[in-house]
Amino acid sequence: MGRVEKSIEIRVPREKVWEMLALDRCPEWMHGPKSAEYTSEVRTPKDKYRVEASAHVIKEKQEELDFEITESLENEKLTVRISPIHGATLTASFVLKPMEVWTEMTYAIDYEMPWGIFGKFLDKLFVRRALKKDISGEAEKLKSILEK
């Protein structure tokens, strides 16, 4: 299993960062998604963050993904399972740590490549580097939106 991680300081309270982690807000700052709609019932704002909340995401090239929250601690941690991604299993987690006047967010993706040794080759050649670039860019975009 592979893992890529990025920590970033965002100069807003962690409650503001938490609001942007709602599944339907991901197209605003994530690379690729152009729309996201909840497939689970959302009656209150807190329902957007509950374990088993799910959303269907359509990416720019008409690729479709399903997101499901697997762990949720309000204003502290959110973990989302993302499937399918070309047969790979992906889990994104966001840990929010309050600092004096800002939030430290750690954004991590754990993933497992399919296709045995060929998948390991692709990971070393391309996947790890692409994921590092994606999460770094997404974290920076989230920061710039929130610090406006």
Image (cartoon, rainbow, N blue to C red):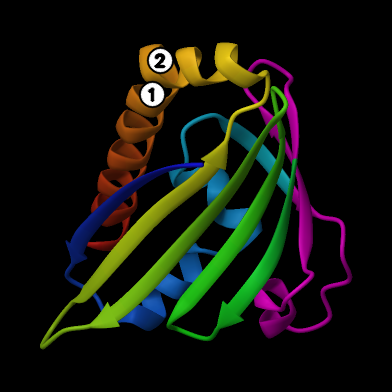
Q: Please give the range of residues in magenta.
A: 37-65
Q: Is residue 72 above or below residue 126?
A: below
Q: Viewer-proximal residue, 71 or 2? A: 2
User: Can I make out residue 148 in this image?
Assistant: no
Mark 2: amino acid: Phe
**Where is residue 4 drawn, in percent x and y?**
36, 43
Residue at label 2? 126
Q: Which residue is mark 1?
A: 130
- Disc 2 to disc 1: CB gap under 8 Å: yes
Q: Is residue 27 magenta?
A: no
Asked which quadrant contains residue 49, the reply is bottom right
Q: Does residue 130 lie above or below 97 as drawn?
A: above
Residue 137: image x %, image y %? Answer: 30, 37
CA separation in Å, label 2 and label 1: 6 Å
Task: Give the residue displayed 67% in from the left and 25% down from the top.
Answer: 114
At x 62%, y 59%, the residue is 80
Residue 21: where, in percent of width, then height? 51, 63
Q: Residue at x 28, y 40 (%)?
A: 136
